[in-house]
Amino acid sequence: MSSKSLEDKIQQAGNPARMLRDAPVGVYAFPFRGEYSNWRDEQEAWNRTAVLFDQSFHMTDVYFEGPDARRLMSDVALNSFRTFGKNKAKQLIVCNHDGRFIGDAILFGLADDKFQLVGTPLAPNWVAYQAETGGYDVEVTRDERSVDNGGKRRTYRYQLQGPNALKIIEKAHGGPTDRIKFFNIGEFTLAGRPVRALNHTMIGIPGQEMTGLEMFGPADDAPAVLDALLTAGAEFGLRQGGSLAYPTTGVESGWAGLCVPAIYTGERMKPYREWLRAEGFEASASLGGSFTSDDIEDYYLTPWDLGYDRVLKFDRDFIGRAALEELADQPHRKEVWLRWNDDDVARAVAASLFGGKDRAKYLDIPYSVYATFQYDKVLIGDRPAGLSFKGAYTVNIGGWASVASIDEADAQDGTDVTLVWGEENGGSAKPSVERHVQTPIRATVHTTPLV
């Protein structure tokens, strides 16, 4: 029997955790060239000179326009919207009615009544559902990521990141540009085309003067703008970044990325599961890692687990507020970095290649993630202490690291932990997982960036 919705698919599978664990898909797709030079120099460039990433294809864009657009966002997000409007932006965080995390995305204020939500499909889908079913006077327009729409997009999106970013912009522009405040949107011209740019950083310290700009505009302008940036950047050491280096930025910046959305259970979420397509992202995603449970709710997270309590504002009613108020004074986990032990990583890599029947799970280089949602166990001794979400090697760190969520009491600089690498019972049925044995990797907790 064919499935029409995510709810149908869950009912047929019988268990959402097992459905995701054996799903025949791998890591989230970044549909652009793997390397333009080599991923090592591309990583180094965002720290020493500048790198340019083409973000035009891998994210879902949903536009919300109408008199209720701002009220809609205020009703669904943890964030405050008291000062939001044209040329403002924010990292929008959404939860379910029980205060469990669904997703995040960047919200762009294109006008006071027109917003663009950009990111993985999780948050845009939830907000679009609320817009379409909640009686809001809002027009919803979708611009799907390229793997879902044959490669065509409405806009281009270029991220320029690094200490030479401003010099490159000014040379390409032909003179000085107005400074853009952090998480505000400015406007200038490149190659005679109007460009809008968000000042934010994928790597480094937030608030540094225009070291990271996300530029966007009509897709037809993309070739001319790209050529202007690359030509201007040649003397400043600009490198174009590929899809091997791109996802490793999150490990340096501390963005956990894709986490299991809290949508797969609960009667209040059932209408949403019935709204989501059976072939959609949430229904087709995969779950990997050494943390294993048949209860999908064990994978759900709270905003505190991911450091999003910093934007949580109880200044109006919104979905999940009552539950979050009850959770506020309870113990939480804290987002941290784990610096993996070099010797243990070398041992795991060797065992994955030369271990024979006892081989370890292969560590992809530089991005060591093999499922849509990666959840690895973190232990102190034999005691569970938290979860690690994404691991990678970067030349700027000089080794492997991951973003993790650790019990508050253990989230102290220098705490020694063990990450369990590989899956139970020889691995799941995912095609991206070869038969292997689990191996421990020692790591050290860091509460501040490693670079």
Image (spheres, rainbow, N blue to C red):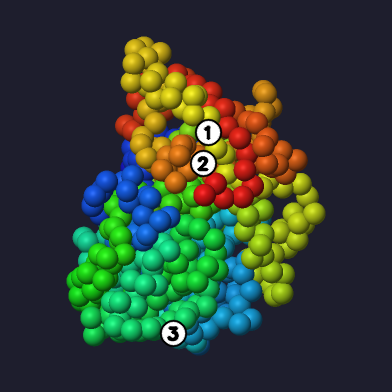
Q: What's the CA distance linking mark 2 and mark 1?
A: 8 Å
Image x and y of residue 318, in percent: 65, 70
Q: Is the residue under label 2 in contact with that under label 3 (CB below 8 Å)?
A: no
Q: Amino acid at mark 1?
A: Trp
Q: Secondary structure at mark 2?
A: strand
Tag nearer the camera, 1 or 3: 3
- Mark drawn on residue 402: 2
Of the pair 204 and 84, the residue shown nearer to us: 204
Q: Is the residue under label 1 in contact with that under label 2 (CB below 8 Å)?
A: yes
Left or right for 215, reference 340: left
Query: In the figure, 375 relative to 448: above or below?
Result: above
- Residue at 62% across, 43% down: 446
Query: In the figure, 101 relative to 130: above or below?
Result: above
In primary-sequence order, the first of circles 3 and 2 is 3
- Residue at 40% across, 56% down: 48
Query: In the figure, 383 relative to 17: above or below?
Result: above
The residue that label 1 is drawn on is 340
Place residue 359 in its image quadrant: top left
Of the pair 194 and 286, the residue shown nearer to us: 194
Query: In the figure, 385 relative to 117: above or below?
Result: above
